[in-house]
Amino acid sequence: MIRLQDITVAYGSRVILNHINLDIRDGETLGILGASGSGKSTILRLIIGLQKPSGGHIFIDGQDITGFTEDEMDQVRLHMGMVFQYSALFDSMSVGENVAFGLRQHRKLPEEEIRKIVREKLHLVGLDHVEDMMPNDLSGGMKKRVSLARAIALEPRVILYDEPTAGLDPLRSMDINRLIVTTQSQLHTTSVIVTHDMESAFFVADRLAYLENGVFRLIADKDTF
Ligand code: ATP
Ligand code: MG
Protein backbone atom coordinates (compact mmCIF):
# COMPACT_ATOMS: atom_id res chain seq x y z
CA MET A 1 0.00 0.00 0.00
CA ILE A 2 1.09 3.56 -0.69
CA ARG A 3 0.14 6.03 1.98
CA LEU A 4 0.38 9.80 1.76
CA GLN A 5 0.10 11.04 5.31
CA ASP A 6 -0.51 14.70 6.05
CA ILE A 7 1.41 15.75 2.95
CA THR A 8 2.06 19.40 2.29
CA VAL A 9 3.89 20.85 -0.68
CA ALA A 10 4.48 24.58 -0.85
CA TYR A 11 6.60 26.86 -2.99
CA GLY A 12 7.32 29.86 -0.80
CA SER A 13 3.93 31.02 0.46
CA ARG A 14 2.11 29.18 -2.34
CA VAL A 15 0.56 25.98 -1.01
CA ILE A 16 0.01 23.33 -3.68
CA LEU A 17 -0.92 20.35 -1.50
CA ASN A 18 -2.47 21.16 1.87
CA HIS A 19 -2.25 18.34 4.47
CA ILE A 20 -3.30 15.57 2.10
CA ASN A 21 -4.11 12.06 3.29
CA LEU A 22 -4.52 9.27 0.79
CA ASP A 23 -4.19 5.49 0.80
CA ILE A 24 -3.61 3.75 -2.51
CA ARG A 25 -4.57 0.11 -2.14
CA ASP A 26 -2.59 -2.78 -3.58
CA GLY A 27 -3.87 -3.75 -6.99
CA GLU A 28 -6.24 -0.84 -7.42
CA THR A 29 -6.25 1.75 -10.16
CA LEU A 30 -6.67 5.20 -8.70
CA GLY A 31 -7.59 8.07 -10.99
CA ILE A 32 -6.64 11.62 -10.10
CA LEU A 33 -8.51 14.47 -11.74
CA GLY A 34 -7.95 18.18 -11.30
CA ALA A 35 -7.43 21.44 -13.13
CA SER A 36 -4.14 22.42 -14.66
CA GLY A 37 -1.68 23.44 -11.96
CA SER A 38 -3.66 21.79 -9.15
CA GLY A 39 -0.73 19.52 -8.21
CA LYS A 40 -1.54 16.23 -9.94
CA SER A 41 1.94 15.64 -11.33
CA THR A 42 3.37 16.69 -7.98
CA ILE A 43 1.65 13.73 -6.35
CA LEU A 44 3.25 11.31 -8.81
CA ARG A 45 6.67 12.94 -8.32
CA LEU A 46 6.28 12.52 -4.55
CA ILE A 47 5.42 8.82 -4.85
CA ILE A 48 8.36 8.07 -7.13
CA GLY A 49 10.65 10.20 -5.00
CA LEU A 50 11.55 12.82 -7.59
CA GLN A 51 10.36 15.43 -5.13
CA LYS A 52 10.29 15.66 -1.33
CA PRO A 53 7.26 17.06 0.49
CA SER A 54 7.50 20.22 2.58
CA GLY A 55 5.69 18.30 5.33
CA GLY A 56 4.20 14.88 6.04
CA HIS A 57 5.26 11.34 5.25
CA ILE A 58 5.03 8.88 2.38
CA PHE A 59 4.87 5.19 3.22
CA ILE A 60 5.32 2.34 0.78
CA ASP A 61 4.35 -1.03 2.23
CA GLY A 62 4.65 0.48 5.67
CA GLN A 63 8.13 1.88 5.09
CA ASP A 64 8.58 5.63 5.46
CA ILE A 65 10.43 6.71 2.30
CA THR A 66 10.28 10.42 3.07
CA GLY A 67 13.84 10.58 4.33
CA PHE A 68 15.32 8.07 1.89
CA THR A 69 18.60 8.88 0.18
CA GLU A 70 18.88 8.82 -3.62
CA ASP A 71 20.45 5.34 -3.46
CA GLU A 72 17.65 4.02 -1.27
CA MET A 73 15.09 5.66 -3.56
CA ASP A 74 16.71 3.95 -6.58
CA GLN A 75 15.90 0.61 -4.97
CA VAL A 76 12.27 1.64 -4.44
CA ARG A 77 12.04 2.89 -8.03
CA LEU A 78 13.03 -0.54 -9.33
CA HIS A 79 9.49 -1.60 -8.46
CA MET A 80 7.86 1.41 -10.08
CA GLY A 81 7.21 2.35 -13.67
CA MET A 82 6.26 5.80 -14.84
CA VAL A 83 4.70 7.03 -18.04
CA PHE A 84 5.49 10.72 -18.11
CA GLN A 85 3.23 13.57 -19.23
CA TYR A 86 5.68 14.56 -21.96
CA SER A 87 7.52 12.00 -24.05
CA ALA A 88 10.59 11.00 -22.07
CA LEU A 89 11.94 8.69 -24.76
CA PHE A 90 15.58 9.03 -25.76
CA ASP A 91 15.40 10.35 -29.32
CA SER A 92 18.89 9.13 -30.19
CA MET A 93 18.14 5.52 -29.21
CA SER A 94 16.08 3.01 -31.13
CA VAL A 95 12.67 2.05 -29.82
CA GLY A 96 14.05 -1.31 -28.69
CA GLU A 97 16.92 0.33 -26.78
CA ASN A 98 14.47 2.70 -25.09
CA VAL A 99 12.45 -0.25 -23.81
CA ALA A 100 15.63 -2.15 -22.86
CA PHE A 101 17.12 0.78 -20.96
CA GLY A 102 16.09 -0.23 -17.41
CA LEU A 103 16.74 -3.90 -18.10
CA ARG A 104 20.31 -3.17 -19.16
CA GLN A 105 20.88 -1.03 -16.06
CA HIS A 106 19.34 -3.31 -13.49
CA ARG A 107 19.30 -6.87 -14.79
CA LYS A 108 22.30 -8.86 -15.80
CA LEU A 109 20.65 -10.80 -18.60
CA PRO A 110 22.01 -12.33 -21.77
CA GLU A 111 21.41 -10.20 -24.85
CA GLU A 112 18.98 -12.74 -26.29
CA GLU A 113 16.87 -12.61 -23.11
CA ILE A 114 16.75 -8.80 -23.16
CA ARG A 115 15.61 -8.81 -26.77
CA LYS A 116 12.95 -11.36 -25.96
CA ILE A 117 11.55 -9.24 -23.11
CA VAL A 118 11.61 -6.11 -25.28
CA ARG A 119 9.66 -7.85 -28.05
CA GLU A 120 7.23 -9.30 -25.52
CA LYS A 121 6.51 -5.92 -23.92
CA LEU A 122 6.18 -4.17 -27.28
CA HIS A 123 3.80 -6.89 -28.36
CA LEU A 124 1.74 -6.38 -25.21
CA VAL A 125 1.24 -2.71 -26.13
CA GLY A 126 0.29 -3.65 -29.68
CA LEU A 127 3.57 -2.81 -31.39
CA ASP A 128 5.41 -5.44 -33.39
CA HIS A 129 8.47 -5.01 -35.59
CA VAL A 130 9.29 -1.50 -34.38
CA GLU A 131 12.42 -2.29 -32.31
CA ASP A 132 14.80 -0.86 -34.87
CA MET A 133 12.82 2.30 -35.58
CA MET A 134 13.68 5.66 -34.01
CA PRO A 135 11.15 7.32 -31.66
CA ASN A 136 10.77 10.34 -33.93
CA ASP A 137 9.52 8.12 -36.74
CA LEU A 138 6.49 7.19 -34.61
CA SER A 139 3.13 8.92 -34.11
CA GLY A 140 2.16 10.39 -30.74
CA GLY A 141 0.00 7.40 -29.88
CA MET A 142 2.77 4.97 -30.75
CA LYS A 143 5.26 6.92 -28.63
CA LYS A 144 2.87 6.60 -25.70
CA ARG A 145 2.78 2.85 -26.27
CA VAL A 146 6.57 2.68 -26.29
CA SER A 147 6.63 4.68 -23.04
CA LEU A 148 4.23 2.15 -21.58
CA ALA A 149 6.33 -0.79 -22.81
CA ARG A 150 9.37 0.80 -21.19
CA ALA A 151 7.51 1.41 -17.94
CA ILE A 152 6.54 -2.26 -17.69
CA ALA A 153 9.86 -3.73 -18.86
CA LEU A 154 10.92 -4.53 -15.29
CA GLU A 155 7.41 -5.72 -14.38
CA PRO A 156 6.91 -3.10 -11.68
CA ARG A 157 4.42 -3.46 -8.86
CA VAL A 158 3.35 0.14 -9.25
CA ILE A 159 2.76 2.11 -12.44
CA LEU A 160 2.25 5.86 -12.47
CA TYR A 161 0.67 7.44 -15.52
CA ASP A 162 0.77 11.21 -16.05
CA GLU A 163 -1.85 12.22 -18.62
CA PRO A 164 -1.40 9.08 -20.73
CA THR A 165 -4.01 10.20 -23.29
CA ALA A 166 -3.10 13.88 -23.52
CA GLY A 167 -2.91 15.11 -27.09
CA LEU A 168 -4.50 11.97 -28.54
CA ASP A 169 -7.77 11.88 -30.47
CA PRO A 170 -10.71 9.99 -28.88
CA LEU A 171 -10.01 6.75 -30.73
CA ARG A 172 -6.30 6.67 -29.84
CA SER A 173 -7.15 7.69 -26.28
CA MET A 174 -9.49 4.72 -25.98
CA ASP A 175 -6.76 2.40 -27.34
CA ILE A 176 -4.41 3.60 -24.63
CA ASN A 177 -7.09 3.29 -21.94
CA ARG A 178 -7.78 -0.26 -23.02
CA LEU A 179 -4.07 -1.02 -22.88
CA ILE A 180 -3.85 0.38 -19.38
CA VAL A 181 -6.63 -1.95 -18.28
CA THR A 182 -5.01 -4.94 -20.03
CA THR A 183 -1.64 -4.17 -18.47
CA GLN A 184 -3.28 -3.89 -15.09
CA SER A 185 -4.98 -7.26 -15.37
CA GLN A 186 -1.89 -9.04 -16.74
CA LEU A 187 0.69 -7.62 -14.34
CA HIS A 188 -1.59 -7.06 -11.31
CA THR A 189 -0.03 -3.70 -10.66
CA THR A 190 -1.15 -0.88 -8.44
CA SER A 191 -1.76 2.05 -10.76
CA VAL A 192 -2.20 5.78 -10.35
CA ILE A 193 -3.47 7.69 -13.35
CA VAL A 194 -3.49 11.45 -13.58
CA THR A 195 -5.77 12.79 -16.26
CA HIS A 196 -7.86 15.78 -17.30
CA ASP A 197 -10.27 13.49 -19.02
CA MET A 198 -13.26 12.31 -17.01
CA GLU A 199 -14.23 9.62 -19.53
CA SER A 200 -10.76 8.06 -19.47
CA ALA A 201 -10.74 8.25 -15.71
CA PHE A 202 -14.05 6.41 -15.46
CA PHE A 203 -12.91 3.79 -17.93
CA VAL A 204 -9.68 2.87 -16.18
CA ALA A 205 -10.06 3.72 -12.50
CA ASP A 206 -11.51 1.80 -9.54
CA ARG A 207 -11.61 4.96 -7.48
CA LEU A 208 -11.47 8.57 -8.50
CA ALA A 209 -10.12 11.51 -6.59
CA TYR A 210 -10.44 15.18 -7.44
CA LEU A 211 -7.71 17.59 -6.48
CA GLU A 212 -8.65 21.22 -5.93
CA ASN A 213 -7.18 24.04 -3.86
CA GLY A 214 -4.68 21.66 -2.32
CA VAL A 215 -7.37 19.27 -1.08
CA PHE A 216 -8.26 15.77 -2.21
CA ARG A 217 -11.80 14.53 -2.47
CA LEU A 218 -12.79 10.99 -3.39
CA ILE A 219 -15.57 11.46 -5.92
CA ALA A 220 -16.25 7.93 -7.12
CA ASP A 221 -15.67 4.34 -6.11
CA LYS A 222 -16.60 1.51 -8.46
CA ASP A 223 -17.47 -0.72 -5.50
CA THR A 224 -20.27 1.62 -4.54
CA PHE A 225 -21.64 2.61 -7.97
P1 ATP B 1 -0.97 20.16 -15.35
O1 ATP B 1 -2.38 19.66 -15.46
O2 ATP B 1 -0.80 21.47 -16.05
O3 ATP B 1 0.07 19.16 -15.69
P2 ATP B 1 -0.55 19.64 -12.53
O4 ATP B 1 -1.83 19.49 -11.79
O5 ATP B 1 0.18 18.42 -12.91
O6 ATP B 1 -0.78 20.59 -13.80
P3 ATP B 1 1.85 20.29 -11.06
O7 ATP B 1 2.83 20.09 -12.15
O8 ATP B 1 1.78 19.27 -10.00
O9 ATP B 1 0.39 20.58 -11.63
O10 ATP B 1 2.20 21.70 -10.40
C1 ATP B 1 1.40 22.24 -9.37
C2 ATP B 1 1.73 23.71 -9.20
O11 ATP B 1 3.03 23.84 -8.66
C3 ATP B 1 1.71 24.50 -10.50
O12 ATP B 1 0.98 25.67 -10.31
C4 ATP B 1 3.17 24.81 -10.77
O13 ATP B 1 3.29 26.07 -11.36
C5 ATP B 1 3.77 24.80 -9.38
N1 ATP B 1 5.19 24.36 -9.40
C6 ATP B 1 5.64 23.16 -9.81
N2 ATP B 1 6.98 23.07 -9.68
C7 ATP B 1 7.37 24.25 -9.17
C8 ATP B 1 8.64 24.81 -8.77
N3 ATP B 1 9.78 24.10 -8.90
N4 ATP B 1 8.66 26.06 -8.28
C9 ATP B 1 7.51 26.78 -8.13
N5 ATP B 1 6.29 26.33 -8.48
C10 ATP B 1 6.21 25.08 -8.99
MG1 MG C 1 0.90 17.69 -14.70
Image (tube, rainbow, N blue to C red):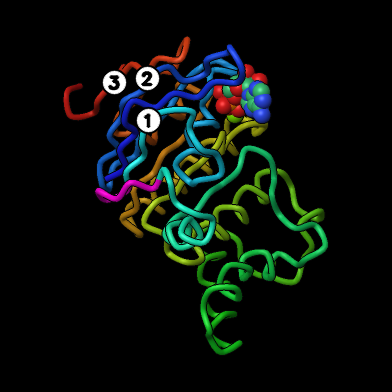
Labelled disc at residue 190: none
Q: Residue at x 52, y 18 (%)?
A: 16
Q: Which quarter of the figure is the C terminus placed in? A: top left
Q: Where are the magenta residues, as a range?
A: 60-65
Q: Residue at x 27, y 34 (%)?
A: 23
Q: Is residue 225 left or right of residue 85?
A: left
Q: Residues within 10 Å of mark 3 (few under 14, many from 20)?
A: some
Nearer the N terminus, badge 1 or badge 3?
1
Residue 40: image location, x then y, percent: 51, 27
Residue 81: image location, x then y, percent: 49, 54
Q: Nearer the viewer, residue 219 or 62?
A: 62
Q: Residue at x 45, y 15 (%)?
A: 214
Quarter of the displayed picture in which ligand 1 can be seen: top right
The kind of residue on which mark 2 rests is His
Residue wearing tag 2: 19
The kind of residue on which mark 3 rests is Ala
The kind of residue on which mark 1 rests is Gly
Please tell me whether residue 80 belongs to the stretch shown in magenta.
no
Mark 2 residue element: strand
- In front of the other: label 1 or label 3? 1
Q: Is residue 170 left or right of residue 140?
A: left
Residue wearing tag 1: 56
Mark 3 residue element: strand
- In front of the other: label 3 or label 2? 2
Q: Residue at x 55, y 59 (%)?
A: 149
Q: Residues within 10 Å of mark 2 (few under 14, many from 20)?
A: some
